[in-house]
Amino acid sequence: MKDAGITILQETPSYTFVISPTVLWVILSVFFILFLTISVIIIYHWTTYSYAPKTVGRVVKIYGFGAALLILSIVTSAILYTTST
Amino acid sequence: MIRLEKDEKILFIIRKHWFVFFVDIISVALLLLIPVTMIASLHYLKQFIDISGNDVALVATASSVVLLFIWTSIFIIWTDYYLDILILTNKHIIDVEQKGLFSRELSMFRLDKIQDITSEVNGLIPTLLKFGTIHIQTAGDDREFLVRGMPKPFEVRHRISKQQSIALKESRVVDISDDSLKKIARS
């Protein structure tokens, strides 16, 4: 069975699940664009409507640090998966 | 941004109680179960499904994507909470309500137009954590102004009432000195 880069090969008694690295990177790119768009919108709100610039500065740092760590984790694990297939 | 009048001063800015933010966060926090379940069930699933390539890396990628979604959602909720404010100036009371990312409502009332202020605390948690609702009735167009999740609503009501009395006194003061009469005559 093959559909949009995801292949499930039925073998008795188990299944083999294959996700093509190209499909994985396309999905991740879509998520990344979505994440960037939302980030720009929320940071715009903080900088435009906030009454405490110091708080905004701190929050941008926390948000950026957490997001950077998670993106690093996504990219590293995706590279590991790509090289293993 | 809010534009104040020349001699208008901000007396205090108040945000909703932290519990309001906490309740909103709980629903997002439940999504943490997704990566936890994915990691926990990987060993079990391996008995039935053979994931081609590095299965741990694939699960780690998916879990990190979910975590990034949760992380972003927390900050969207925080934005909603952080930008919802009540501002008391020496002339106005301003309520700013952020509704999601693309909707923002700003209500502004003159303090001397306020007819009635009521504060209420309903329920066990609001009583213990001291937060509630403030109703403000204004004159003229019979508009009711409702602010939910306010910390220390009785204290806030007292401060608004106090400032309202000052605003009423100021609005009643009429300058009838010679200079002011001459200015009126000229205009």
Image (cartoon, coloured by chain):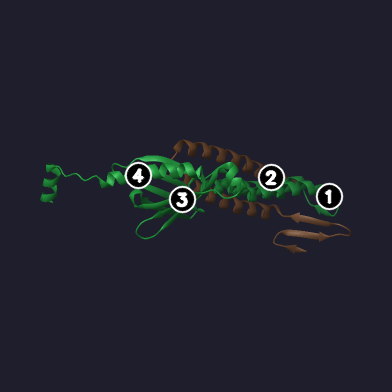
Chain colours: A brown, B green
Instruction: Report which residue position mark 3 lands on.
Output: B118
- The kind of residue tagged 1 is Tyr
- Residue A33: x percent and y percent? 56, 52
Label 3 sits on a secondary structure element that is strand
B157 or A17, which is in the foreground?
Answer: B157
Name the side, left or right, on which B30 lies relative to B112: right
State whether discs 4 and 2 lie on one chain.
Answer: no
Q: Which circle marks residue B170 in the picture?
A: none
Q: Is residue A6 above or below residue B112?
A: below
Residue A76 visible in the displayed image: yes
- The kind of residue tagged 4 is Ser
Label 4 sits on a secondary structure element that is helix
B173 or B58, which is in the foreground?
Answer: B173
Q: Which circle marks residue B165 in the picture?
A: 4
Q: Nearer the viewer, mark 3 or mark 1?
A: 3
Name the side, left or right, on which B113 lies relative to B146: left
User: Is there a contact, CB below 8 Å, between mark 4 and mark 2?
Assistant: no
**Residue shown at 66%/49% (left/top)?**
B66
Instruction: Report which residue position mark 2 lands on.
Output: A79
| Badge 3: residue crowd in 10 Å (few <14, some 14–19, many ≥20) | some
**Residue shown at 86%/52% (left/top)?**
B47
Name the side, left or right, on which A50 lies relative to B173: right
Q: Say which chain tag 2 marks.
A: A
Q: CA distance from mark 3 to mark 1?
A: 58 Å
- Residue B32: x percent and y percent? 69, 47
- The kind of residue tagged 2 is Ile
Q: Is residue B115 above or below residue B178?
A: below
**Residue shown at 82%/47% (left/top)?**
B43
- The kind of residue tagged 3 is Thr
